[in-house]
Amino acid sequence: MPKSRVTRRALLAGAAPLVAAGPLAKLAFGEDDRLATHLGHDHVHSNLGHAAMIGAEVPAVGGPHDLDELTIPPPALPHQPGRVREYELVAVDRSVEIAPGIEFPAWTYNGTVPGPVIRATEDDLLRVRFTNGGTHPHTIHFHGIHPADMDGVFEIVGPGETFTYEFPARPYGMHLYHCHATPLKKHIHKGLYGAFIVDPPEPRPPAQELVMVMNGFDTDGDGGNNFYTVNGRSFFFAKHPITVSRSRTVRVYLANLTEFDLINSFHLHGDFFRYYPTGRDEPVLFTDTVMQCQGERGIIEIDFANTGLFMFHAHQSEFAELGWMGFFNVVD
Ligand code: CU
Ligand code: CU
């Protein structure tokens, strides 16, 4: 067994509230009882079957609305010539709790991992004032079309310095941003990234809109992720299912900022969705599973056929077991 896998399980075993979760613990340990016993966590198994995979007993950090700001994007605005969209981003070194009792010493934009959702309509002038309040040099590199001196590669912003990125937002689609200081892998996995939505001039049809940034956290510094999440907290949407309406399209702006693992994925139970790579024109897939490489992103549109609880998670089972899973609660 490769070292990183052992370490991942050891870490999960060390997180007592996670272990107490019964079926969750079984998910994490079921295939390797010997290892769990060896680690001194055989008491895990005595708890099996007592807790649900959903709801109050799920080991996730925080209250039901803690991730609203990262999950519910600001509304799309129709095209308006000459409009300026202004954002203020500050890089801050900050510890974030990604699972109960598990602190990650993050580098953040505005204190959260991922950073804030940045949204503009195509041709808006995007103005992002960036202050580096951290202890390392950082930048903001946006995906999209912009001048070379706005690319977040050459204009390194040192601690205490400020830089203003300014360019017309284009092309419309689902994009992302991240720090591009070196070593790049470190600046990304420490948490400096977020979703960047550029709306088409003619707004998309009304929908219940959600943002999901898939990411991972290497909490032991071995170059492999120990926890996987969407929007920064393991099992958050299992503890707090996302209520959606059957009569309304659900639109998920999905991006993959997971470092170390080459791909991540989104799998929906009980239904199919349309998938628009990079948020462009025609859907190219009607499916229940889509994968994204690092930096890849797209838009998912779901019209639920049935009401009830439907799971969504990474189809890499290990990612799901280590936190990347949740539920939609579909109601009439
Ligand atoms: Cu950086
Ligand atoms: Cu990139």
Image (tube, rainbow, N blue to C red):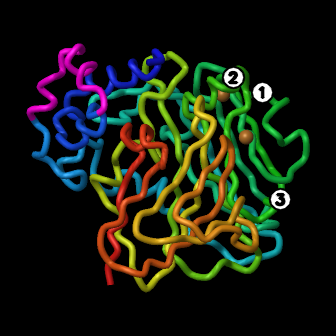
What separation in Å lies between label 1 and label 3 (alpha carbons)? 21 Å
The local crowd at label 3, few if under 14, some if 14 to 19, many if 20 or more residues have their Cα within 10 Å, is: many
Residue to which mark 3 is pinned: 168
Task: Residue at 81% x, 32% y: name it.
Answer: 153
The residue sitting at 15% across, 23% down in the picture is 42
Q: Is mark 2 within 8 Å of ligand 1?
A: yes
Circle 2 crowding by C-alpha within 10 Å: few under 14, some 14–19, many from 20: some
Magenta highlight on residue 28: no
Element type where label 3 sits in the image: strand
Residue 45 pos. (x, y %): 14, 32
Q: Which range of residues does the magenta coloring cover?
A: 31-46
Question: Helix or strand or loop: what does disc 1 sit on?
Answer: loop
The x and y percentages for residue 92 are: 54, 31
- On the picture, is 272 further left or further right than 22? right
User: Which residue is painted at 30% across and 73% down in the image?
Assistant: 308
Please state which of residues 14 and 79 is positioned toward the viewer in this rendering: 14
Which badge, 3 or 2, is on the more N-terminal residue? 2
Is 213 located above or below residue 85 in the figure? above
Task: Measuring from the top left, give residue 87's x and y in whole percent.
Answer: 65, 52
Secondary structure under the numbered disc 2 in the rendered image: loop
Q: Residues within 10 Å of mark 1 (few under 14, many from 20)?
A: some
